[in-house]
Image (tube, grey):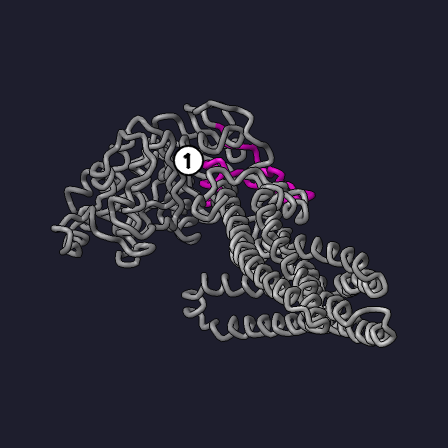
Amino acid sequence: MQIRDLPYSDPGDPDVRSGPRFLFWLGRNQLGGQLKSLSWGLLHQLGIAGLPVTVGLAVQAVIDRSGGRLALAGGLIGALGVLIAVGDTMLHRTAVTNWITAAARVHQLLARKTAELGSALTRRVAAGEVVAVSTGDVEKIGWFVEALSRFAAAATALVVICVGLAIYLPSLGLMVALAMPVLALAVLPLLPRATRRADEQREKAGKATELASDTVAGLRVLRGIGGEELFLGRYRRASQEVRRAAVRSARMWALISAVQVLLPGILLISLVWYGATLARDGRIDVGQLVTVYSAATLMLFPLRHFEEIAMAYSFSRPSAQRAVRVLSLHRSAREATVEGVTPTGDLYDPASGLMAPRGRFTAVVCGDPDEAGRLAERLGGHAETGEEDEKAVAVAPSVLLGGVALDEIPLDAARAAVLVQDKDPVLLSGTLRELLDVPSSGLVTADAALEAARCGDVLSALAQASADNDGDPMRTRITERGRSLSGGQRQRLALARSLVTDPEVLVLDEPTSAVDSHTEARVAAGIAKLRQGRTTVAFASSPLLLDAADRVALVHQGTVVAVGNHRDLLRTEPRYRAVVTRETDEEAAATNASNGVGGVPALKSDDVPAMKNIEEVEERA
């Protein structure tokens, strides 16, 4: 895999049983790249290993006053220099390719899992942790994958050099060969403590990231209640804890580095002392001593890769574990078991008893907005789950569409059948045409969707802002999250985008909460007209939208307690009337005392439109 070939057409199915298994899976999927990097690394390392031999030959040639051997040694040194340069260049190229492609694979896996889980992801994993995994953790995982081949090349080179020295000059070569395993493994007793401190640092950094993410998300609210300084103080304390943990971790790694400098230094001093004694006694040549000393000196370079791989693994293992925690999540306790099925029919939620008949416009009234949001997500096939033994366990039965459980059909089929628009839809940056260019049935045009969502004023505003596009609003660029538009305009454009898709079932959570009453009445009529013959569910408490629905269901404490049309429920159901008319307890008690439970309440002037047809409201508008 080359960088130019990214992204992967299929990143694969990762082994998420543990962090180390995930790292092994990544390395196995990059076997070709790892072998390339290993080959170039061996060329580089063995080229370096050959330098002491040629230097020793050159020194001995000078001592023996042999011009021919000196010229041969010089030529060999030049050739080795070329091999070292080529090997180092290609090693760096292939190793960095392994890093980038591994990080890209993990990014694709995380993006795929995020798309699969949707809003359920942040209910089961903190948003800050997801950010930490997709940024810093991905980089650390890529670092380990990249360092693995360089470490393998360095270890192989060390074995070759030690064997070669033992054969070339046993009196000194065996000394070096016996010392190398000690030098390579001397840091192992320190690694567990260093790993624990590194884990502690990353855990504190993750908590600080979560705190920062949550604070930024709620910054406007914090400013409103004057809580900025409070949360700033909390983040400062969390930041200082991260700093102290980082210092503690750095001390351990500094100690490891010191050990890897001290012990090789002792080896070199011992080697020079013993070798000089042998050379003085005439038992070895000066050139042989220079060769062995140079080889031992150059062996310190591949030894550094042992420290690097230890650091890379200690940092990447917890990062891989966090990535596994996200990648092991599933949208439900059950995997898809029904293939090739696009269900149609009534939408039914067994947990609440909510029924949305096929082809009808059903409105749902909930006194608790959070309860309405959870029910809307459940209707989209995201069953509420808990965690038991690190596995998702459904706490509510799956929603049925035409008698088929949504969490038992493939995700693509479930998403095509049911579309949920939450109460805070996001508009991506781009032109209006790009915004409405979404997967759809093709039966609803962009113009029809914009008309149904009553986006005429939005189109006029975009046309005025599109001086470079001949006044074409469809070519006007919308800023990120639609910040150049008002809240009501953003909401209606998001509604038009949902209407264009024309799904079998469309679930809308408060689709008109940010518009005025006159526009709301026209939008409600537009939805009812455009979605005629399609199943539509709208969570709302506005009388204007409720009056446009074919049927209305009242959900109280998670259960449907009343079903009917808006006007009948307004007359007969006190709980419905309290939510829709914002009736206080005192007003409800007075109404019930004068008219009985089923009596008609005295409506305020603000509630009059709720008792009129939408057409009348439009005419009056």
The residue that disc 1 covers is 553
Identified by mark 1, the residue type is: Ala
Secondary element at image label 1: strand
Which x, y percent locates residue 193? Answer: 75, 65
Total label count?
A: 1
Residue 398 within the segment the image draws in magenta? yes
542 or 394, which is in the foreground? 394
Residue 374 within the segment the image draws in magenta? yes
Q: Is residue 64 left or right of residue 149?
A: right
Which x, y percent locates residue 12? Answer: 55, 38
105 or 609, which is in the foreground? 105
Name the residue at 48% across, 71% down.
227
103 or 466, which is in the foreground? 103
Q: Quadrant of residue 170?
A: bottom right
Q: Is residue 278 above or below residue 122?
A: below
Q: Is residue 310 above or below residue 276?
A: above
Which x, y percent locates residue 596? Answer: 41, 40
The region drawn magenta spans 372-400
278 or 356, which is in the foreground? 278
Name the residue at 28% across, 45% down.
434
Q: Is residue 91 left or right of residue 195?
A: left
